[in-house]
Image: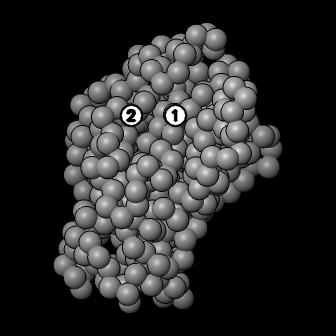
Amino acid sequence: MNRRRVVVTGLGLVTPLGVGTAPTWQGLLAGRIATGPVRSFDAGPYRVDRGAEITGFCPEHHLQRVPAESIGRASQFAAAAARMAVADAGLDDVPSPAMAERSGVAMGTTSGEPAEIERFDDAWIAGRSAESDPRFVQRYPFHVIAQNVAAEVGFRGPVRMLPNACAAGNYAVAQATELLRSGAVDRMLAGGADIFSRITYSGFARLGAVAPDRCRPFDRERRGMIPGEGAGVLLLETLEAARARGAHIYAEVAGYGLSCDAHHMTGAHPTGDGAVRAMERALSSAGAVPGDVSYVSAHGTGTQANDRVEAIAIQRLFGARAAATPVSSIKSMIGHTMGAASAIEAAVCALAVRDGWIPPTANFVAADDDCHLDFVPNVARRLPVKLAMNNAYAFGGSNASVLFRAVDA
């Protein structure tokens, strides 16, 4: 079947490195660390005190249609990133009815709007009538994030919300790509959003997964991940439509692969079986082989088990070429942004293809015996990127790999 080709024409990022694509991309290439002491609540009871929080974000400056005070922080991030992506793609601020009906949204998240649960709980404990607060039902349900994105940009096509935890951003890109390939829509906003919250922090701290100082993916001394927050949104459309309107093209979504370990609720399969299958399926759908891959954007959380399994999976698939294939994790700089992570990393892959730069793995000193790969340590690398692979793995064993490649002029 001759399916339509899908390309990235717009990007929007809200990350701990800054609001906008430029500050995030420039910060990553400079190896800037955006993690530090937790500011939004007292982390003393958790015995760890490190996070990656966003400062200087004023939703009123970025939202035009949806009142900022009426939506939660994750929706604010998502809607702001979506508006940036639409503007970056050069699309009209007010879509025509015909365009709006052929334009959809696919968003991913891990926790939705946990701050709303926290406020509800705090009010209940304090004896206030939490049930009378209408903001709870307006802001909390996961689905409102995607709906708020659609409302902000005026898209009236299909709206999908995918709570596939830390692989949700890649799942959203895959879903959007399939809708475009099928001809059901002409353009899609795809991405993910999550916020820094006490609930999320508490869960990872109780698991002993939060690093006490810095996130050191694949490093011999790695001691855990650092929770973060943010949003990443990509504007996807068909290659034919993008060329017809003279749009700037970052990269093509060459293919994707999805799998499930069906092994453990939090731990990946120890031999990386699910991760390998996701990467294999992505390559097969793109008509590519491991030797075609110029760069792997790793899930790379900085935990002992995750990094070991991911390194094993890459070594299994790439074989003799594994050591020569650049692999890096931007979580070393912006923390783990949960459901936004692979969406932000997808945007980074598109930028790597466009600019020929690979962001580094920061805080890296030396690999351990299980992680013998080229981790682009500490300094960005100038290298033509013909095909970038974006890997994402989540609790429950959800695996998603998406490929981005250069489009010939």
Where in the figure is residue 240, as x and y percent of width and height? 32, 84
User: Vertical placement of 283 versus 35: above or below?
Assistant: below
Tell how many labels.
2
Q: Which mark is residue 54?
A: 2
Q: Which mark is residue 196?
A: 1
Task: Name the one closer to the observer, 161 or 384.
Answer: 161
Residue at the (25%, 75%) spot, across then down: 92
Q: Which mark is residue 6?
A: none
Query: Is disc 2 in contact with disc 1, using a CB cutoff of under 8 Å?
Result: yes
Of the residues under marks 2 and 1, which one precedes in the sequence?
2
Left or right of 262 on screen, residue 183: left
Residue at the (78%, 40%) spot, across then down: 265
* Quarter of the image where one finds residue 30: top left
User: Dot 2: within a 10 Å radius of its alpha carbon, few (fewer than 14), some, or many (20 or more) residues?
Assistant: many
Left or right of 17 on screen, residue 48: right
Task: Give the amino acid at mark 2.
Answer: Ile
Where in the figure is residue 197, as x and y percent of width and height? 56, 32
Left or right of 358 on screen, residue 291: right
Identify the element where label 1 is drawn: loop
How far apart are the alpha carbons under marks 2 and 1? 9 Å
Where in the figure is residue 334, as x and y percent of width and height? 40, 32
